[in-house]
C-alpha cells in the first residue's frame, strides 16, 4: 500500500513539474536568459569597440549581447590597424535536452525565438592592435612589435651586429 502511495506522489510531482515548466517558459530563458556578457580588451587600451557596425564601448569593457545572433566585432584606435573578429552563436545541447524533457516543444520554440537556446563564443575578446605603417615620398616608417599575428607574412629579418 505504501509503495502505491509513493508512486502516486512521484507521478503527481512529475506532472506538477511539467505544468510549471511548460507554463512559465523554457529552460534556456530561465537558466541564463537571452543575453550574455562578453568582455573586451585591447593592447593598447582605450580603443573603440564596434558591434555589428555600431560604437558600443571602449576597452576594457563588458557588453551584454543577444545570444540569438552572431556578432561582428571591430576594435579601432587612431594610429593603429583595425582589429576585426566574429563572435559566433552555438547551440546549447543541454538546453535542447532540458527543453524537450521538461517543457516539450513549447519551451524549445520559446528558446529558439528568444535566442536563449544559444551561447556566444568566445566570452572574452582580446585585440592586439598593430601600429599603422606610414610612408612619405622619400621615407618609409616601420613599426617593430614583439608579438606577431598569425596572418602576417614575414618579409625580412633583423640580425644582431
Image (tube, grey):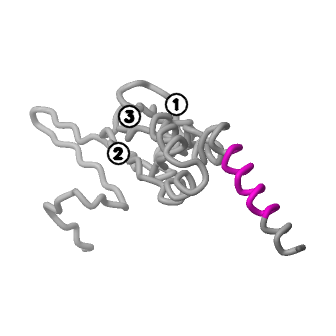
- The magenta region covers 8-20
Q: Which residue is mark 2?
A: 86
Q: Residue at x 10, y 32 (%)?
A: 137
User: Does residue 13 lie above or below 139 as drawn?
Assistant: below
Q: Which residue is mark 3?
A: 76
Q: Earlier in the sequence, mark 2 or mark 3?
A: 3
Q: Which residue is mark 1?
A: 57
Q: Position of residue 107 (x, y in %)?
A: 55, 43
Q: Position of residue 125 (x, y in %)?
A: 46, 49
Q: Between residues 115 and 76, which one lies in front from this camera angle?
A: 115
Does residue 17 belong to the magenta stretch?
yes
Helix, strand or loop for disc 1: strand
Q: Are marks 1 and 3 in contact (CB under 8 Å)?
A: no
Q: Residues within 10 Å of mark 1 (few under 14, many from 20)?
A: some
Q: Residue at x 56, y 36 (%)?
A: 64
- Give the distance between the C-alpha atoms of the residues marked 1 and 3, in whole angstroms: 11 Å
Amino acid at each position: 500500500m505504501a509503495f502505491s502511495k509513493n508512486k502516486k506522489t512521484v507521478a503527481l510531482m512529475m506532472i506538477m513539474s511539467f505544468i510549471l515548466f511548460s507554463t512559465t517558459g523554457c529552460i534556456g530563458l530561465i537558466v541564463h536568459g537571452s543575453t550574455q556578457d562578453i568582455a573586451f580588451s585591447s593592447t593598447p587600451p582605450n580603443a573603440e569597440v564596434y558591434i555589428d557596425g555600431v560604437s558600443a564601448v571602449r576597452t576594457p569593457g563588458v557588453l551584454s549581447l543577444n545570444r540569438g545572433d552572431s556578432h561582428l566585432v571591430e576594435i579601432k584606435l587612431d594610429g593603429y590597424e583595425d582589429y576585426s573578429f566574429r563572435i559566433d552563436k552555438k547551440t546549447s545541447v543541454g538546453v535542447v535536452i532540458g527543453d524537450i524533457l521538461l517543457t516539450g516543444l513549447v519551451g524549445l520554440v520559446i528558446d529558439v525565438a528568444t535566442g536563449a537556446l544559444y551561447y556566444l563564443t568566445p566570452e572574452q575578446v582580446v585585440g592586439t592592435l598593430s601600429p599603422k605603417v606610414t610612408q612619405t615620398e622619400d621615407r618609409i616608417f616601420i613599426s617593430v612589435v614583439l608579438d606577431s599575428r598569425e596572418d602576417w607574412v614575414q618579409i625580412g629579418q633583423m640580425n644582431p651586429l
